[in-house]
Amino acid sequence: MRISTFDTTLRDGTQGEAISFTVEDKLAIALKLDELGIDYIEGGWPGSNPRDKDFFIRAKDLALKHSRLTAFGSTRFAKNPVDRDPNVKALVEAGTPVIAIFGKTWDLHTQRALKISEEENLKLISETVRYLKDHGKEVIFDAEHFFDGYNANSAFALRALEGAKDAGADILCLCDTNGGVLTHRIAEIVAEVRKRFDGVLGIHVHNDSETAVASTLAAVEAGVTHVQGCMNGYGERCGNANLCSVIANLELKLGHTVLGPEKLASLTTVARFIAELANLPLRGDQAFVGHSAFAHKGGVHVSAVLRDAATYEHINPALVGNRQRVLLSDLSGRGNVLYKLKQHGIADRLTDDARRELLERIKHLEYLGYELEAAEGTFELLVREALHPGVTFFDLESFEVTTRMEDNLESKTSATVVIKAQDGIHTASAAGHGPVNALDLCLRKCLSTLYPTIANVRLTDYKVRVLEPKKGTAAKVRVLIEWSDHQRSWATVGVSDNVIEASWRALVDAIRLELMRLTEADDSVTRAVEDYCWGV
Ligand SMILES: [Zn+2]
């Protein structure tokens, strides 16, 4: 069955506490949703704020290829005749082919909030729908609080729907506005409504009971053919039904036609694009499109997945444009590391002993508190060292760092480093901006005659994380340093209960890695590691 999709990221989505889009963002998102093949894009409420009004003015120039732009608003106010209601006027002026209007279908609201009779409420609905139809609009009637309303007084709720239908509404959309109705009840009520109304029924569910996606799917099973939701599940309070998951499930699990396979394969890209504009990280564990949605960490899982992905994956990730990732971890067996190395043709270059030793080193480092997933530089160095056993470049003889502060003035730091390289002992001293900089300068001085090109590598970020917070200032720390050679960037990691030692370890790894890369131009190892660490 063909199911039409209605995205309200730009309207309901922006009700989410952390979400704010500029007009430019909204225009860019509308274009992206159009590319994805969403049928209706609800752009905002033109009668409620200047930003939405501005959006609709500028959206007139958007050359949408597929999506029908929709303006949202309420039925006329009780005190205004429909042709003089400013909200209805703003809806018509928005110039969209489609208008979604919400009306009351819960007697509690007409009695308590609007303080009007049922007859009056029906008039608000039918007059507004008819007025918009007379203006040539496709009209979606959002039956606000429909499920709560049906539970409280089904006859009242159904009469409101009937009023909208008789006035010419093209789609009757049943809304669980408070998000509190559970899936089985949504399905029952939709089935009852389906019996009484032909034509297109829609569903709009909020996620306050964390069942919005399930309820949306159940509604489709009960006869709905129009689904509303927000990309990434954004929305007021706990969000709306996550349209990414709704679409993927409808298409891949329930056999409906929604976007078609080609566009479905861009779902992950679009979800990320929108998260980017929302300035929110896309949740790693977000179903279908998250970075971790097809990530495997446990050793047993990994070896099974490598033999047959179906063992631990509910769909082929490529269908939604995501991909399988295999994570390194002390939990894992040998499969994880070998998987990545195999993909890039590196595994065959390692001897059995070297492979085993590499895995042992990784496990040991992770046990000590290293986080190799975030430190591709250190991981790459391990792999390169396994490929070239015995290549060390230099060993540390000693280092010393002094920081001196007097009279609360700016502190001064100097360091001395002694290393043993292949041509003998090198000693260097330097003053620096803090201990890491001073050590870095010393190390580079020591190596500069032997390896002049290491000068290209620069530190770009430095982060410290306490690993054992209960120990206070005596805690072990993990230092993550980011580097760049102006073409690419990578991070190295060091762990110690001494922050300077941890920094030194991360620093030395970065320099060693650079020397390794210079020695062996082949960068398949770099690609394998980047592929693993950055994934999609
Ligand atoms: Zn809503």
Image (cartoon, rainbow, N blue to C red):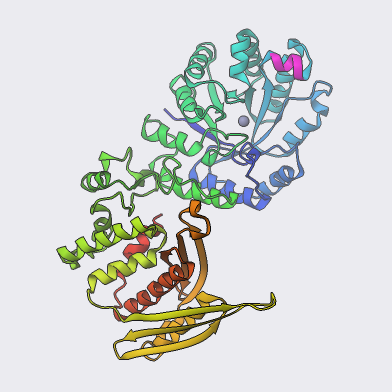
Q: Identify the residue at horizontal 56%, vertical 29% (top origin).
A: 208
**Ligand 1 visible in quadrant:** top right
Q: Quadrant of the N terminus?
A: top left
Q: Is residue 121 left or right of residue 216?
A: right
Looking at the picture, does residue 66 appear above or below residue 347?
A: above
Question: x%, y% of residue 44?
Answer: 67, 39
Q: Is residue 304 left or right of residue 37?
A: left
Q: Between 359 and 1, which is closer to the camera in this rendering?
A: 359
Looking at the picture, does residue 222 appear above or below residue 22?
A: above
Residue 525, picture quadrant: bottom left
Main SS of residues in magenta: helix
Q: Identify the residue at horizontal 28%, vertical 62% (top origin).
A: 361
Q: Which residues are magenta?
A: 108-113
Q: Is residue 325 left or right of residue 128?
A: left
Q: Quadrant of the C terminus?
A: bottom left
Q: Between 41 and 389, which is closer to the camera in this rendering?
A: 389
Question: x%, y% of residue 70?
Answer: 63, 36
